[in-house]
């Protein structure tokens, strides 16, 4: 099993959730996060009014609002999930996000004590 952690634009969460649901992965954790990449948070990434003092330099923000999605999937489904997330979120512009794939040793469903893949199905 693998955990897929995707950092994406907030406005892409709905479309990403719908696409993953169609693939049979309706369960996920979505967390609002702040961060920036190597471009240091260019203002053009977001569409909102910037309050005074939040900018480090002209046209650069301290942090950009993003969403972090966490999905645990079977090993054989990783490539399909990754390609779906990329297809939905790729604009070829700065700020499209990142995806991390991490190994999962075990999962326990608290309610039933099921473990492993049985806990995510």
Image (cartoon, rainbow, N blue to C red):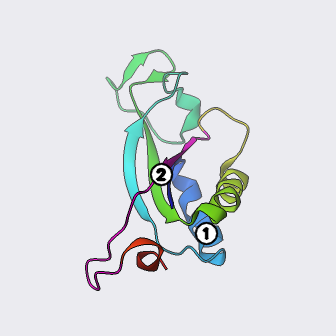
Residue 30 lies, with reference to residue 58, above or below; the image says: below
Dividing the picture into quadrants, the one containing residue 106 is bottom left
Of callouts 1 and 2, the N-terminal one: 1
- Please tell me which residue is depicted at 59% across the width and 61% down the height of the picture: 75
Image position of 63 (left or right of 89): left
Dot 2 falls on a residue whose secondary structure is strand
The residues tagged by marks 1 and 2 sit, at their Cα atoms, a distance apart of 20 Å
Please check the rendered image and state whether residue 39 is part of the magenta-colored stretch, yes or no: no
> Was residue 108 drawn as part of the magenta stretch in this picture?
yes
Q: Residue furthest top?
A: 57
Q: Mark 2 points at which residue?
A: 103
Q: Position of residue 98 (x, y in %)?
A: 56, 40
Residue 76 percent location from the top left of the image? 65, 64
Q: In which quadrant of the rendered view does residue 17 lie?
A: bottom right
Identified at 54% across, 26% down, the residue is 42
For the point 36% across and 32% down, the residue is: 51
Callout 1 secondary element: helix
Q: Residues within 10 Å of mark 2 (few under 14, many from 20)?
A: few
Eye-nearest disc, 1 or 2 = 2
- Please state which of residues 75 and 96 is positioned toward the viewer in this rendering: 75
Q: Please state the horizontal and vertical placement of residue 90, each as a whole percent of the image.
A: 70, 46
Q: Nearer the viewer, residue 8 or 74?
A: 74
Residue with the mark numbered 1 = 20
Q: Give the range drawn in magenta.
A: 96-114
Q: Which is nearer the eye, 44 or 32?
A: 32
Q: Position of residue 81 (x, y in %)?
A: 64, 61
């Amino acid at each position: 099993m693998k955990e897929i952690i995707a950092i994406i634009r907030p406005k892409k969460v709905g479309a990403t959730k719908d696409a993953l649901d169609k693939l049979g992965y309706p369960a996920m954790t979505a967390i609002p996060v702040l961060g920036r990449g190597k471009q240091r948070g260019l203002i053009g990434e977001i569409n909102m009014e910037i309050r005074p003092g939040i900018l480090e330099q002209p046209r650069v923000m301290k942090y950009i609002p993003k969403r972090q999605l966490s999905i645990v999937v079977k090993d054989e489904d990783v490539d399909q999930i990754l390609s779906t997330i990329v297809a939905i979120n790729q604009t070829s512009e700065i700020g499209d996000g990142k995806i991390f794939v991490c190994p999962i040793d075990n999962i326990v469903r608290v309610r039933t004590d099921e473990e492993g893949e049985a806990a995510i199905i």
